[in-house]
Image (tube, rainbow, N blue to C red):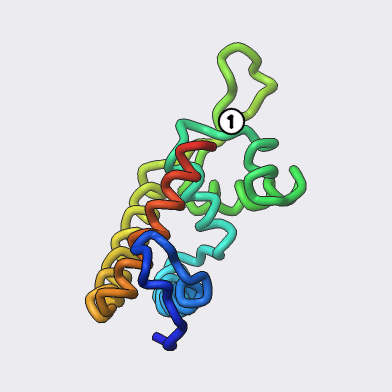
Amino acid sequence: MKASTLNTSSPQKVDPNRLADFVMMTQRSCILNLSSELNRGNISFPQFFLLTYLSSEDYLTMSAIAKKMGHSTAAATGLVDRLEKLGFVERVHAAEDRRKIMVRITNNGSEIVSTMRQHIASELANIMEDLDEVDASSVAAANQAIEGKNLES
């Protein structure tokens, strides 16, 4: 990793430049692995990201998918169409209003997300084994800050 300076007077103070170096290094490594794995299943990155959203929810409506993905509803519908043809998601009607369509991940979709998560975790473990104590402390502090922000949301 590039040698950016870290303020060592406080173990919780993270140098954003050093953290950016770590993120770019891990992203490059994980994305390359992710790309080759996704190509086997003919899944694009946006489709995979949608699957990851769906894997943490019981279902999402088309408007919620569009919002999460930063797409129009029509574009979200196209993503869902392709994933449905591949057997990774399914559409279901809401019990209270059959006009309302909800999308949920299938077992096949969940398996893809789980497999990719395992690949990413393994890659990150390999990268983190090579970190020195200062860099590992920076990553741990940044992770705690991110988890704290996520709990507030």
> Where's residue 6, x and y in %?
42, 76
Residue 112, above or below 84: below
The residue at the far front in this view is 9
**Closest to the observer: 18 or 41?**
18
Can residue 146 be seen? yes
Q: Position of residue 150 (x, y in %)?
A: 48, 43
Q: Residue furthest bottom?
A: 2
Q: Residue at x 34, y 63 (%)?
A: 11
Q: Nearer the viewer, residue 152 or 110?
A: 152
Residue 32 visible, this angle? no
User: Position of 114 compared to 82: left or right?
Assistant: left
Please count the marks in the image: 1
Q: Secondary structure at mark 1?
A: strand
- Residue 96 in the image: state x and y as whole percent: 60, 11
* Residue pictured at 57% horizontal, 34% vertical: 60
Q: Residue at x 51, y 32 (%)?
A: 59
Q: Which residue is mark 1?
A: 102
For the residue pair 18 and 91, the one nearer the viewer reads as 18
Q: Position of residue 55 (x, y in %)?
A: 43, 43
- Residue at x-position 69% and y-position 44%: 66
- Report which quarter residue 5 is drawn in: bottom left
Sort mark 1 into few (<14), some (14-19) or many (20+) by Cα contacts within 10 Å: some
Mark 1: amino acid: Met
The C terminus, quarter of image: top right
Q: Is residue 111 left or right of residue 32?
A: left
Seen as rendered, the residue at the extreme left is 129
The N terminus: image quadrant: bottom left
